[in-house]
Image (cartoon, helix red, strand yellow):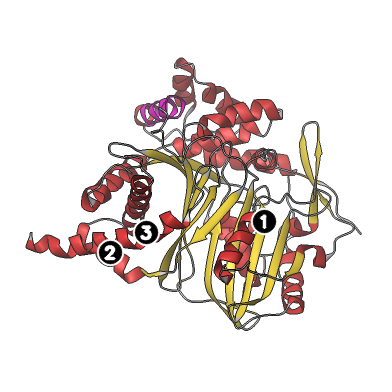
Amino acid sequence: MSQPAERMSRVDTAWLRMDNDVNLMMIVGVWMLQPGITHAALCERIADKLLKYDRFRQRVVQDAVGASWVEDEHFDIERHVVREVLEPRPGQSMREALQERVGELATLPFDPRHPLWQYHLIEHYDGGSAMIARVHHCIGDGIALISVVMSITDGGSEPPQRREREKPDEAHEEDWLSEAVLKPLTDITIKAIGMYGSGVAKSMEMLSHPQQPLLGSLDVARVGYQVVNDVGALLLMPDDSPTALKGHPVGKKIVAWSEPMPLDRVKTIGKGLGCSINDVLLACVAGAIGSYLRETGEDPTGKEIRAMVPVNLRPLEEAWKLGNRFGLAPLVLPIGIDNPIERVYTVRRRMSELKGSYQPLLAFAVLAVAGLMIKPVQDALLGVFAKKSTAVMTNVPGPAKALQLCGSTIRQQMFWVPASGEIGVGVSILTYDGGVQFGLITDAQLCPQPQKIIDRFEPEFEKLLLLTLMLPWA
């Protein structure tokens, strides 16, 4: 017996309708396995684990006011778990062929008549197997999807038992929005924002639930001042520096990734400089991009680019519920600072400025309201993020120990989140099994050779390590 249709949340609807000609809202990941696994084994594992989550058996039906999740009565697992043969062109390595295939799949739309996900298994890759996963962002954000996709690994957890909801889905969503977005604020704060003529104030009011009491124990003046500043920062963000990485993409994607670097060495630098691991890694990203631009003949001195960084807004133990519950924080990367030590401290300062900011919450509110609008209005509303940024960036701590899938070891993995609007660069940092690696997905028009940026990460890191070790002697 088929299950009744379920309304899609406002935020998930916004992501569903954010697809455009140059950017599909698709999260793409790659796993390298040793030894290889078979298509039959992967199908069996996904049927046993992944399909216990309703979303992976449901298709999307859009209507005039939004969309619904509806069970696919013609579901066929072999439509979603596809066997592929990778044949490199003359002079092309297997890795280059795999990277090319990932780029092709990142631009291949899903069939809207069926659930919006696929696994592509390459059974003979580098003495093992490679697996490319594609999932539409409307199903869930990166944190949720990592949690759920990890369920297919050996010993992966089952989805927690769902309790019957006492309220309709939409009411449940509004309760969550009130809890996550409005309770950190006060009605006085919202009025204060309104005095500044902010469209976000109206967005917040649309999301508000008059019956829900707002916290009155917060320091109203402090919170109000902070929120007003953050709203102003969102609305009045200047354009970041013009570089070759910003412009009009053509929609052809190219991906690249690095080999893992030992995480312990990154921790050594962080400890020596009094910075976080994140500060060190982001400084290396900024340095690699600056170095790449110099080689292409562009002087990055004094330039900064902005990357929109997802910020999780859900308890991690609820990641299995899927959906999108994250905000966006605008992080400025100092690509024009050549001195690695100075660059790290600048990144640390920028990160400190974001702490305690309400910008991720406000960005979530904008995404939620965008899900209520017709697509042209939604595109205009979300354009404030895309036009002010050069890249999207994710930094995800993965498992500390190597995972197994169908008895094989996942020796390496990488994933990329989509970019919205006309953003043409996506940066991923992933820690896994004691290593850290970088990945890039770029538009061919804006960055035709992302491997040239990837190849600069390790030299930037080594330079920073050397200078850090020399500091006590300086």
Residue indicated by mark 3: 457
Horizontal side of 430 relative to 75 (left or right) equals: left
Q: Position of residue 276 (x, y in %)?
A: 31, 57
Residue indicated by mark 2: 462
Q: Amino acid at mark 3?
A: Phe
Query: Quadrant of the image for the C terminus?
Result: bottom left
Mark closer to the chain start, 1 or 3: 1
Q: Residues within 10 Å of mark 2 (few under 14, many from 20)?
A: some
Residue at image position (73%, 79%) is: 41
- Which of the two residues, 93 or 233, is positioned nearer the viewer here? 93
| Element carrying mark 3 | helix
Verify CB contact (< 8 Å) between mark 1 and mark 2. Answer: no
| Element carrying mark 1 | helix
What residue span does the magenta drawing correspond to? 223-237
Pick out the residue farthest to the left.
Answer: 473
Q: Amino acid at mark 2?
A: Glu
Q: Is residue 232 magenta?
A: yes
Q: Amino acid at mark 1?
A: Leu
Residue indicated by mark 1: 105
| Element carrying mark 2 | helix
